[in-house]
Image (spheres, rainbow, N blue to C red):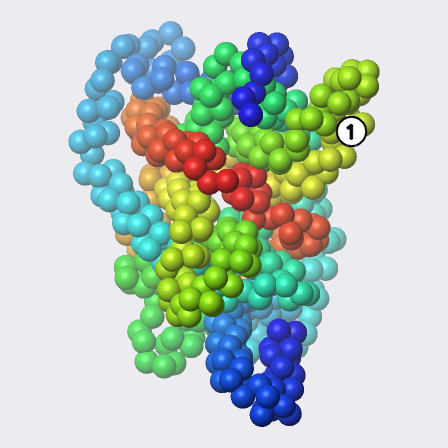
């Protein structure tokens, strides 16, 4: 918007002094038409992204009789019953709590182990470092379905089955490699002279790492935490397989809406809308670095 | 600058090695164990050699699923990469709207995968969904639960909705990294918009595009939750992809041996692509400043 406004004022300014700037005018007009086309393209794409989201919001605010009875683009009888039911029924809200528990646990574990490892990869070369890095990558790329059965048996054997810790540990399979990758990318952007100066000044490694190095890669740590959070939050297959009743994640709770009477669409939509909230809350903080995170710290 | 050799760096890497071993190597060894034996109980197990592998590789169902998977992944790439470049070129370059667009674009990436399926189910159903009702009212006989083509289109559009933003974000970051001087030089030469794209922007995007292609290929190759929720793999088997086949076999029917053999083959395919990915990324670091 600001750009097109600026282009418009540019244009009127050009018209005022069209004798002196006669040659610049056609070029500017062409640019402004071009940028309008660009905004239409972008607008259409964002519209395409938003419509299904809007439709789910719309459904979540309607009673089931209306969803199945009348077709309307907005709620005719606005109701918050679906949300109220989720917040008052423990079977529902514990699903969210369980999900948040294992996601938080996973983010903490992944960051704790990945920080020193990423430092080692970015600063030193050691025996087998390249092979190790490749091995980590294969785990990020492995289909979770491959690990389904062994995980199920492993966690049952060690007595972790149906606990948030089981899911958190299972999700380290893809989150730890991811965290190492992203952090390594960010750390390599910090010049090595900083480390050397700190050592000369008498800093020990742990003190240097916490007091000097971590503040320098704050953005990277934030983005990594965001990605660990996100990939653990969106995963369904492992989370569902490794839990039964006690630690059931929201993804599995959502299948409850399917009953003999058919699917409770309003409730399902409301539950879906609520799963968007945590992501939507944190995304603003990492908006600038999100692309760098997806490129594994390499843009 | 060359990194100094320092063998004790292994101690820093050790926690990662331990935790990933626990969640990767032990399970993988179990899979290998199952893949070569027929297990009836704790005390009766027989070594069967490559029997399960022969069975899996000869299974026409699985071959079809592999074919579908490859078709799906190619279609995903053919749509999402060019679309991502196009949308990234439309992005504003600075100001408040950049942040707003980035947040809106990233929103689909944060939706839990099963909720993506749910959302499109609600959106595409011919009785209550906006898209379903709209398509039917303008004359298309659209029903994704009954018609194979409709089901495919729905799954594909859903994936485009879900993941195109990834390639948009990557391309946008790549475009931001092009110095203004390049565009100024192009303007002096009187280059057309197409020439600027072809000879300045595209070469500079090569790195991020490679990452986008490989990430999208591998993630679409292991897609599970979205089609599982949306179509349940149907109608018939028409949208059943590899992960779903494997999940059914492993925890649905408890066919341990064949499922394990299948897992290993699946894993090897992914390993092959990971190797290509790794080599490419490594060479990128050397080639591009």
Check the picture and name the quadrant holding the N terminus of chain A. bottom right
Residue B49 at x, y = what percent?
23, 13
Please identify the quarter of the rendering in which residue B155 is found: bottom left
Relative to A109, residue A254 above or below:
below
Tell me the SS state at disc 1: helix
Kindly identify the residue that appears in the image at 65 percent across and 53 percent down. Answer: A287
Please identify the quarter of the rendering in which residue A78 is found: bottom right
Horizontal side of residue B120 vs B68, given as left or right: right
Residue B111 visible, this orientation = no
Relative to A181, residue A68 above or below:
below
Residue B30 at x, y = what percent?
41, 17
Outermost residue toward the front?
A20
Closest to the observer, B128 or B14: B14
Residue B232 at x, y = what percent?
39, 50
Residue B110 at x, y = what percent?
58, 51
Closest to the observer, A199 or B213: A199
Closest to the observer, B47 or A298: A298
Residue designated by label 1: A212
Q: Chain of mark 1?
A: A
Horizontal side of residue A103 vs B20, given as left or right: right
Check the picture and name the quadrant holding the C terminus of chain A. top right
Residue A187 visible, this orientation = yes
Kindly identify the residue that appears in the image at 67 percent across and 65 percent down. Answer: B95
Please identify the quarter of the rendering in which residue B13 is found: top right
Q: Residues within 10 Å of mark 1 (few under 14, many from 20)?
A: some
Kindly identify the residue that appears in the image at 69 percent across and 70 percent down. Answer: A79
Outermost residue toward the top?
B43
Horizontal side of residue B30 vs A278, given as left or right: left
- The tally of labels here is 1
Kindly identify the residue that appears in the image at 32 percent across and 19 percent down. Answer: B35
């Amino acid at each position: 918007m600001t750009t097109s406004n600026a282009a418009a004022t540019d244009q009127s300014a050009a018209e005022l002094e069209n004798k002196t700037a006669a040659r610049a005018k056609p070029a500017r007009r062409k640019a402004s038409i071009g940028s309008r086309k660009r905004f239409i393209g972008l607008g259409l794409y964002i519209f395409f992204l938003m419509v299904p989201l809007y439709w789910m919001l719309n459904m979540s605010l309607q009673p089931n009789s209306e969803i199945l009875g009348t077709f309307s683009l907005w709620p005719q009888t606005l109701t918050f019953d679906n949300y109220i039911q989720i917040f008052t029924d423990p079977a529902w809200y514990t699903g969210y709590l369980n999900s948040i528990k294992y996601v938080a646990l996973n983010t903490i574990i992944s960051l704790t182990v990945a920080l020193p490892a990423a430092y080692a990869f970015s600063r030193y070369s050691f025996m087998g470092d390249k092979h190790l890095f490749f091995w980590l990558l294969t785990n990020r790329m492995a289909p979770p379905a491959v690990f389904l059965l062994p995980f199920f048996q492993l966690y049952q054997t060690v007595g972790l089955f149906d606990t948030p810790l089981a899911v958190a540990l299972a999700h380290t399979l893809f989150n730890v490699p991811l965290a190492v990758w992203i952090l390594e990318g960010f750390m390599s952007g910090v010049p090595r002279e900083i480390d050397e100066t700190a050592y000369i000044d008498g800093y020990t490694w742990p003190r240097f790492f916490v007091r000097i190095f971590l503040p320098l890669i704050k953005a990277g740590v934030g983005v990594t935490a965001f990605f660990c959070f996100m990939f653990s939050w969106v995963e369904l297959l492992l989370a569902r397989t490794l839990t039964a009743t006690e630690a059931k994640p929201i993804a599995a709770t959502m299948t409850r809406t399917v009953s003999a009477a058919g699917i409770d669409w309003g409730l399902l939509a409301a539950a879906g809308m609520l799963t968007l909230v945590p992501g939507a809350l944190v995304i603003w903080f990492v908006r600038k670095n999100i692309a760098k995170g997806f490129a594994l710290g390499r843009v | 600058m060359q990194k100094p050799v320092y063998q004790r760096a292994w101690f820093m890497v050790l926690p990662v090695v331990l935790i990933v071993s626990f969640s990767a190597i032990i399970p993988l060894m179990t899979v290998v164990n199952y893949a070569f034996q027929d297990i009836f109980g704790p005390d009766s197990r027989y070594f069967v050699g490559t029997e399960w592998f022969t069975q899996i590789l000869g299974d026409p169902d699985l071959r079809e699923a592999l074919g579908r998977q490859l078709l799906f992944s190619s279609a995903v790439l053919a749509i999402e990469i060019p679309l991502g470049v196009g949308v990234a070129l439309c992005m504003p370059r600075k100001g408040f709207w950049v942040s707003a667009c980035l947040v809106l674009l990233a929103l689909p990436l944060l939706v839990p995968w099963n909720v993506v399926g749910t959302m499109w189910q609600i959106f595409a159903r011919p009785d209550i969904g906006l898209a379903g009702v709209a398509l039917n009212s303008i004359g298309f006989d659209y029903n994704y639960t009954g018609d194979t083509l409709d089901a495919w289109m729905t799954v594909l559009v859903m994936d485009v909705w879900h993941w195109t933003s990834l390639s948009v974000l990557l391309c946008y970051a790549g475009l931001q990294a092009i110095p203004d001087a390049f565009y100024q030089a192009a303007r002096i030469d009187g280059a057309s918009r197409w020439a600027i794209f072809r000879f300045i922007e595209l070469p500079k995007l090569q790195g991020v595009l490679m990452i986008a292609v490989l990430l999208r290929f591998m993630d679409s190759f292991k897609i599970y939750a979205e089609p599982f929720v949306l179509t349940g793999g149907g109608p018939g088997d028409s949208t059943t992809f590899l992960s779903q086949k494997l999940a059914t076999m492993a925890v649905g029917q408890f066919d341990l041996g064949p499922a394990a053999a299948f897992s290993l083959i699946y894993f090897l395919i992914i390993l092959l692509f990971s190797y290509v990915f790794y080599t490419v990324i490594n060479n990128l670091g050397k080639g591009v400043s």
